[in-house]
Image (tube, helix red, strand yellow):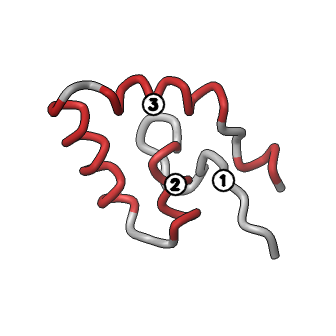
Amino acid sequence: MKKRLYRSRSERMISGICGGLAEYFDIDPTIIRLLFAALAFAGGASIYAYIIGLFVIPNEEEVR
């Protein structure tokens, strides 16, 4: 089965981007969320990446 990146419906806090990335890389979503938060305080680049991902990464229903 081919791995697909999507915004998660089950591991969702705001829009499911961190949950979808965690499912794609098969790691805990908390690690991705902490990484995004650390990068947001370190310079703000993750905020822009999150906003871009919000528009680019499809919902889980659209992929399946």
Nearest the eye: 22 or 39: 39
Task: Identify which amino acid the numbered label 1 is placed on.
Answer: Leu
Q: Which residue is label 2 attached to?
A: 21
Tell me which label, 2 or 1, sits earlier in the chain. Answer: 1
Q: Position of residue 42 (x, y in %)?
A: 16, 33
Residue that protrudes farthest toward the bottom in the picture: 1
Placement of 55 over or under 6, stated as above or below: above
The residue tagged with tag 3: helix, strand or loop?
Answer: helix
The N terminus sits in image quarter: bottom right
| Disc number placed over residue 49 in the picture, else none | 3
Q: Residue at x 36, y 54 (%)?
A: 32
Mark 2, Cα crowd under 10 Å, few <14 / some 14-19 / many 20+, is many
Q: Position of residue 56 (x, y in %)?
A: 66, 31
**Cα separation between marks 2 and 1:** 7 Å
The residue tagged with tag 1: helix, strand or loop?
Answer: loop
Task: Identify which amino acid the numbered label 3 is placed on.
Answer: Ala
Placement of 54 over or under 64, stated as above or below: above
Task: Identify which amino acid the numbered label 2 is placed on.
Answer: Leu
| Disc number placed over residue 5 in the picture, else none | 1
Q: For the residues labelled 3 and 1, say whether their Cβ atoms are less than 8 Å apart.
A: no
The C terminus sits in image quarter: bottom right
Q: Residue at x 56, y 53 (%)?
A: 20
| Side (left or right) of 47 relative to 35 | right
Q: Position of residue 38 (x, y in %)?
A: 19, 42
Tell me which label, 3 or 2, sits earlier in the chain. Answer: 2
**Cα separation between marks 3 and 1:** 15 Å
Mark 3, Cα crowd under 10 Å, few <14 / some 14-19 / many 20+, is few
Q: For the residues labelled 2 and 1, say whether their Cβ atoms are less than 8 Å apart.
A: yes
Quarter of the view holding residue 48 = top left
**Cα separation between marks 3 and 2:** 12 Å
Mark 1, Cα crowd under 10 Å, few <14 / some 14-19 / many 20+, is some
Nearest the eye: 46 or 11: 46
